[in-house]
Image: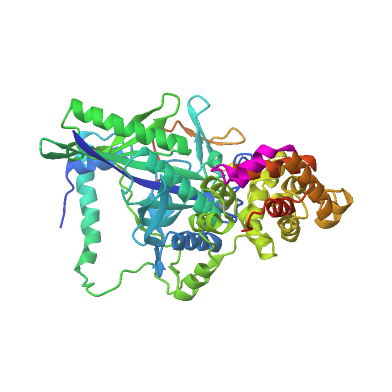
Amino acid sequence: MSEQIAATQVEHIARLARLALTHEELTRYGEELGHILAYIEQLNEVNTEGVEPLAHPLAVHNVWRVDEPQPSLDAQQALQNSPATDGRYFLVPKVLEHYDAS
Amino acid sequence: MQYKSLIGMEIHVQLLTRTKLFCGCEVQFGTEPNTRVCPVCVGLPGSLPAINLHAVELAIRAGLALQCTIAGFTKWDRKSYYYPDLPKNYQISQYDLPIASQGILEYELHGERRPVRIRRAHLEEDAGKNLHDSPGMTQVDLNRTGTPLLEIVTEPDLHSAEEAFAFANELHRLLVYLGVTEGVMKKAQMRFEPNVNVIITHEGVEYATPICEVKNLNSFKALRSAVDFELQRQLAEWQRDHDYTLASCGKENRGWDDDRQETVYQRGKEEAHDYRYFPDPDLIPIVVDDAWQECVRKALPEMPLARRNRFMQDYGLGLKEATLLIEDRPTADLLDAAVKAGGPGNILAKHFISFWQQHANSRECTIAQLGVTAPRLAELANLQQLGRISSSAAATLSEALFSSDQSPAEIARQRGLEQVQDRGAIERLVDDALADNPQAVELIRLRDKKWEKSLGFLQGQVMQKSKGSASPILVREILMQKLDLNQG
Ligand SMILES: [Zn+2]
């Protein structure tokens, strides 16, 4: 059982989430995240030997939508909840380049 | 220095569906931003995705054509994603149970078939577009968000830029053939990501350079150039520093700068994303039973390479011509249909690659789109086969088929395009030709080694005298008779 997450690991996660943490924060989050993990790890006490991994809690499969277009929102509706728009696009703080969806 | 290049490929293919993978928004390129969006693809709270059946079927079709095993049970997973063009903060993908796995695709290079193993193919949704044109802010267009993609991953079975290029072309041809994708490269409907590294043997020690993945190449040319550049770059880098290895540097992502024709470092392994996959609780699993698979398998068309070979064998086409003819599936289907309608295959094929192709070119369409039916194509070819019209008359007639509903035979008669079948008339022309060319006649009588050439020459003379209207078959027959040559 891990009570504490190493500061280096917290640093790594912070970096992925683009968060700049102070030294104190690294220690504190290490502790707090460790508690959360310990809580979740109680699940490991259950014997799951021979149990198939569950993909979905309901025993259903193959429910489809046919490939027929449905009306979309218009741009005004789509953008109405956005904190910033130029009327055509969602505007967000500058995104760093060099990423990928794949 | 001895070395071996290893290239694997990840390919993103946009599936040919009308709607997105999990919502009914239309998939449409180039429309006004954020007008093909709904609560599902914008990622509004409380919205639920619903699976597009057609996308799943296309994935199974592609999987079977790639000789993959289709998963009997497959599910959806969330992959963490940190950019605003996929606002849910995750991409729906398939992690440990891809819909298809362990297949093979053969491509051809220098007349030789080469296999590439397919590791897996899975369904996932595309991201939207982030635009960086305006200062200080990023503009986000979600029209493309949620478009169905098939991601195909190969084993590192390619060993040069040339091979990567040939393989990519074959995969593209196959998937377009199957109707799995429209495959329009300009619309980024197929994107390549080669994984490149080099295994170097130096003084008995083996070194592997870092595996570099070049992201998002959307032309065959860029693919070839990028792989070529990477191989050279990695070799040069290693020569400078023998510690430039996979073991010490890990994997690297690079981008392609098309203007400078070079790859650019993006990120290394220490910055690698932690995708934190987990099963998507909003989506239910997919079960593909044998009956469904069989149904899709039965509907698969003949594969492009097999069809090309059949065209070469059955219709007497050369490699280049056959390759051209199979490129457009409806056109190849039309040729087969015309043969089925009773037309002679080799003459039909010649018509296709000559004047029908020219008509298509000048109308900027495909042969199939010309709208001439298979029976009429067959009839025109038959007229030539029977010697009733010459090949040049067939070309003239073909033009007339666009403006007339009459049968090709009827039009030929009306326009005086039929060949002279009058034996007496042709005999007179042959006699003239023989009298005019005693030297050629003598060479044939002496069976000079060029006698066949002389015979061809005489035949040409007769055709000229008839101004092309004599039936070549009849001319040859009469010539042979008069020169006492055995037929056959
Ligand atoms: Zn939508």
Instruction: Name the spot of residue B159 as percent of width and height, x first.
Output: 31, 43
Query: Is B437 in the magenta?
Result: yes
Q: Main secondary structure of the magenta part?
A: helix
In terms of image quadrants, where is residue A94? Answer: top left
In terms of image quadrants, where is residue B264? Answer: top left
* Image-based side of B272 in relation to B153, left or right: left
Residue B257 in view, yes or no: yes
Find the magenta span and give its range: B436-452
Vertical arrangement, residue B293 with respect to residue B307, above or below: below
Query: Is B313 in the magenta?
Result: no
Instruction: Name the spot of residue B200 as percent of width and height, x first.
Output: 19, 37
Of residues B198 and B435, the one drawn nearer to the viewer in this rendering: B435
Of residues B58 and A9, the one drawn nearer to the viewer in this rendering: B58
Report the quarter where the C terminus of chain B lies.
Answer: bottom right
Of residues B408 and B421, the one drawn nearer to the viewer in this rendering: B421
* Image-based side of B41 in relation to B223, left or right: right
Number of labels in the image equals 0
Vertical arrangement, residue B357 with respect to residue B77, above or below: above
Instruction: Name the spot of residue B112 as percent of width and height, x first.
Output: 39, 49
Residue B89 in view, yes or no: no
Q: Residue at x 46, y 71 (%)?
A: A61
Instruction: Name the spot of residue B146 as percent of width and height, x first.
Output: 51, 50
